[in-house]
Image: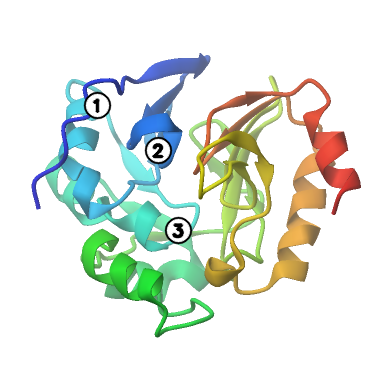
Amino acid sequence: MKSPNFSLLHRHLVAKDVIHLPLMPRNAINAYLIEDVLIDAGTKCSTGLLLRYLKGKALNAHALTHAHADHQGGSKVVCTNFKVPLWCSSLEKERAESGLATKDYVDQRHLVTRFQQQYWAGPGHQVDKTLEEGDLVGGFRVIATPGHSSGHLSFFRESDGVLIVGDVMTNMNLINTRPGLHEPPELFTEDRERNIQSIRKLLALDPRTLCFGHGPVLYERGELKRFLACL
């Protein structure tokens, strides 16, 4: 499928060796390059744009926060084109390798579920290494953050407080695209209570720069404490 040409999108440096790659307008879907590792790969519709972002970059691995359709859609193309390994948690491996990205969604018959599997999910690709809590990826420590999906991972760099959140939280309303912290939608979340525990786990790290799967990068100025108080 041909990638849309979003002329307003551009990659930008978030912190040292961390590049934000917006794959839809208003940061609706994001990927990140941390040193030489690509974190997430958007949908299969955005693969062409992702490859243009990565042109000329040294890439040595591709890792997933989780294998939902809007994160693994371009994984096979990226790994094949750059000849790099795919990494994810052991609990996401089956979904990443099969391409059945929506198989654990709450409602399999829901229109959005069927749309994402047909139009967003990419083909499966072999997982070369499974990641566990405490592993290092591109200078970031792997944090197990289950709930949104059973094997969801986040990535944290302690030296400057940069956190790759994934979908534990979003920084936008996915209906009207207005920025702001939210829990992920229940339709796509396997266990809301576990996800809330993961939110608290991430906030305990005292992150200073948060990079989300959905929504703009957040430079923390007290928003997290206010959000936590509402959970």
- Residue drawn where x is 53% and y is 29% of the image: 216
Q: Is residue 124 left or right of residue 167?
A: left
Q: Residues within 10 Å of mark 3 (few under 14, many from 20)?
A: many
What is the spatial separation of the Cα atoms under label 2 and label 3, in whole angstroms? 15 Å
In the rendered image, residue 115, in percent from the top left (x then y), is placed at: 30, 68
Q: Quadrant of residue 158?
A: top right
Return the residue found at the far right.
229
- Residue drawn where x is 57% and y is 60% of the image: 152
Mark carried by residue 53: 1
The reply to whether discs 1 and 3 touch (Cβ–Cβ < 8 Å) is no
For residue 86, above or below residue 30: below
Lower position in the chain sequence, tag 1 or tag 3: 1
Could you tell me the amino acid type at mark 3? Cys
What is the spatial separation of the Cα atoms under label 2 and label 1, in whole angstroms? 10 Å
Q: Residues within 10 Å of mark 2 (few under 14, many from 20)?
A: many
Q: Quadrant of the C terminus?
A: bottom right
- Residue drawn where x is 23% and y is 43% of the image: 46
Lower position in the chain sequence, tag 2 or tag 1: 2
In the rendered image, residue 10, in percent from the top left (x then y), is placed at: 31, 19
Which one is nearer the viewer's eye here, 185 or 39?
A: 185
Could you tell me the amino acid type at mark 1? Tyr
Which callout, 2 or 3, points to the residue nearer the camera? 2
Tag 1 secondary structure: helix
The reply to whether discs 2 and 1 touch (Cβ–Cβ < 8 Å) is yes
Mark carried by residue 88: 3
Return the residue found at the far front.
176
For residue 98, above or below residue 210: below
Lower position in the chain sequence, tag 2 or tag 3: 2
Could you tell me the amino acid type at mark 2? Ala
Tag 2 secondary structure: strand
